[in-house]
Amino acid sequence: MSDALRFDGKVVLITGAGNGLGKAYALAFAERGASVVVNDLGGSATGVGKGSKAADLVVQEIVSKGGKAVANYESVEDGEKVVKTALDTFGKIDVLINNAGILRDKSFARISDEDWDIIQRVHLRGSFLVTRAAWPHMKEQGYGRIIFVSSSAGIYGNFGQANYSAAKLGLAGLSNTVALEGKKYGIQCNCIAPIAGSRLTETVMPKEIVQALKPEYVAPVVVYLCHDTCQETGGLFEVGAGWVGKLRWERTEGAVLRQKNKTITAESVRDNWTKITDFSQSTHPRSNQESSGFMIQLVNSMDQEEKEAQEAANSNDPVALAKTMKLQNIKFTYTERDAALYALGVGVSTAQDDFLKFLFELSGDFTVLPTFAVIPGFDAIMSVDKILHGEQYLELFKPISRSGTLVSKAWIADVLDKKSGAVILYNVETFNENNEKVAFNQFTTFVVGIGNFGGRSTSSEAKLLVDVPKRAPDAVKQEKTSIDQAALYRLSGDRNPLHIDPSFAAMGGFKTPILHGLCSFGYAVRHVMSTFANNDMSLFKAVKVRFAKPVLPGQTLVTEMWKEGNRIHFQTKVAENGNVCITGAYVDLNAATEENKLKQVSDLQSTAIFQQMASQVKNNTDLVAKINAIFQWNITKNGADATTWVVDMKSSKTGQVFEGKPVNKADCVITISDENFLALVSGKLDPQKAFLGGKLKLSGNIMLAQKLGDLFANKSKM
């Protein structure tokens, strides 16, 4: 082969080369033209005794095939003597394979000092001593290739091998540092964790497995890593049975526990443990700088924030001081029940044609109203007495899932002086469980009695209102609220007594409790979406309103609308008295092309199957007990994520099948296209063939997938 990887003129030193993997490495390098130093002490697998036979036999085999080789019988603890053989015989050393090793397997409680020390001396210290002896020669010639041999026991741990595991993971760390320090001298270093049949692995593997894992399957990887054409350095590779894969460190996004003027406690760790251990937004640090750099940035950022807060306090500037305030992040968990309750709160009724998509969780197109996104962050800003909600801006970045957990982060964007009071602009960003931004809210609030402090009256941070066009409206929609509308809406979170208790309403100057501004807001946006988007809530992009006059429960809301491109201007009046309750308002819609795209993705055949499954497995306690697992089905369409269904046969005695993210972590996650799911359930697609062919992907406890046969067979008639 003209492109064969040759080592002509190279000198390769391999420790522990008298048997198994070491022998395979020696033969492979010699076959490709290298001059090989075959080092082997000749002792037993436990490190007892010594002899020359093992190394001599390998040398003889190489020489008999026309290769060049010399034996060395020193212990790796005499690293200088081992390397001296290469220098005396061949004049240099180009490649070093630190392969020598022994085993002293015992349970942790039974490991003696001798068993611990000899493993560290041979594996870790021996590799260090031989590498240190070779280092100056490689450095002087500006070239070197070094391999350290770790193990899966070092990476993952293994029962009865605490001493061996510690040494082998130590080799991985040593390899990383040697790679960093050797880079500028042309010295590359990598680490492998091989799985192969040898006199060492036969102590921890069945005999038939040892025989099937040939060292010859590992040697080619080592050969390539040591060739001039390979530029890999600092890598860690698992190798065995003809397979090779590179490992990297994975870290969760983690949680910031340090808060200004607050002590970090064990309880704060506990309360953030889910985020600390959540790998859905993981990172893969590749260096010490990447690992710790963000912590230094965090400290600097927090120190800067504290400095700014102190400067604001010293300046006696109330606006600057307010902006430095840190508002508590709000975690909000909701279900389809909460979404349906909110829909009822803003006027969805079973008298409407398409009520099922907003009120019935088993509806194939069940949808959360976009204005529901004001609810998660509401508690973050409604903690000040004498506060009036003046304006609201909401922007959605992706449709709200039908259930899940959202985290809202709030801050004060600005404070304006309106003489009789102050306007405070609160910005709130809301993120889902995958740390994707779902929504942005700006609450414009008026606080009575704290104005006239000499501040500005306008702000560049404010989302501005837009006057409605000066022409007759393009559409008008009228809807009467219920006398109990405020009582119903407050169950979604705004429990201000002003909206339910007549005595509190009287204190505010109202004869009866008034309707929440955000309830009228929800009504008005529904009117716009039903008129100009055919109730396709995926077309909603943003809305801005000003609350001008109060509305009483039982009054009739009249929304006048003007369409200008993708922006729908509107204002809402109270029919009974003609007062305009919402002014300067608009809804921005997504482009129509997005409508077609989203409709295509949402038109799923699998929906009907899961709905049927939900009704048939519910309350089937025998089936729940038999399966006892949570399955998450990720359904795709045209190569894109379409929806997620959960089959929960574990969390309670009654089975649950619902669309959305699992409340508890799924035991098994299945990813399949909508088309292939239909074929799978109908029996047209064999599960095993689908898995092997890549049409069905499994993660988690994949053995649980065998129980799906019981689930599909259960009265499904599918």
Image (cartoon, helix red, strand yellow):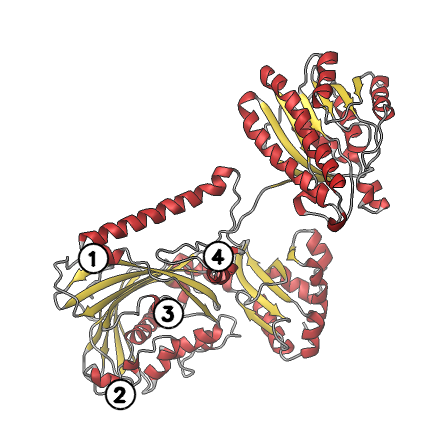
Q: Is residue 127 depicted above or below 677 in this figure?
A: above
**Disc 1 marks which residue?**
319
Q: What residue type is labelled 3?
A: Ile
Which element carries disc 3, helix, strand or loop?
A: loop
Going by the image, does 528 lie left or right of 622? left
**Disc 3 marks which residue?**
375
**Earlier-in-chain disc, 2 versus 4:** 4
Which element carries disc 4, helix, strand or loop?
A: loop
**Earlier-in-chain disc, 1 versus 3:** 1
**Disc 2 marks which residue?**
502
Rendered location of residue 258, percent (x, y): 41, 54
Which element carries disc 2, helix, strand or loop?
A: helix
Q: Is residue 195 depicted above or below 39 in this figure?
A: below
**Earlier-in-chain disc, 3 versus 2:** 3
Q: What residue type is labelled 2?
A: Pro
Q: Can residue 300 be seen in this view?
A: yes
Residue sitting at 53 percent across and 75 percent down? 362
Q: Nearer the viewer, mark 1 or mark 4?
A: 1
Q: Which amino acid does label 1 sit on?
A: Val
Q: Which of marks 3 and 2 is in front?
A: 2
**Earlier-in-chain disc, 1 versus 4:** 1
**Disc 4 marks which residue?**
434
Rendered location of residue 700, percent (x, y): 64, 57
Spatial CA span between label 1 and label 3 = 27 Å
Q: Nearer the viewer, mark 2 or mark 1?
A: 1
How crowded pointer 2 is (Cα within 10 Å; few <14, some 14-19, many 20+) is rated as some
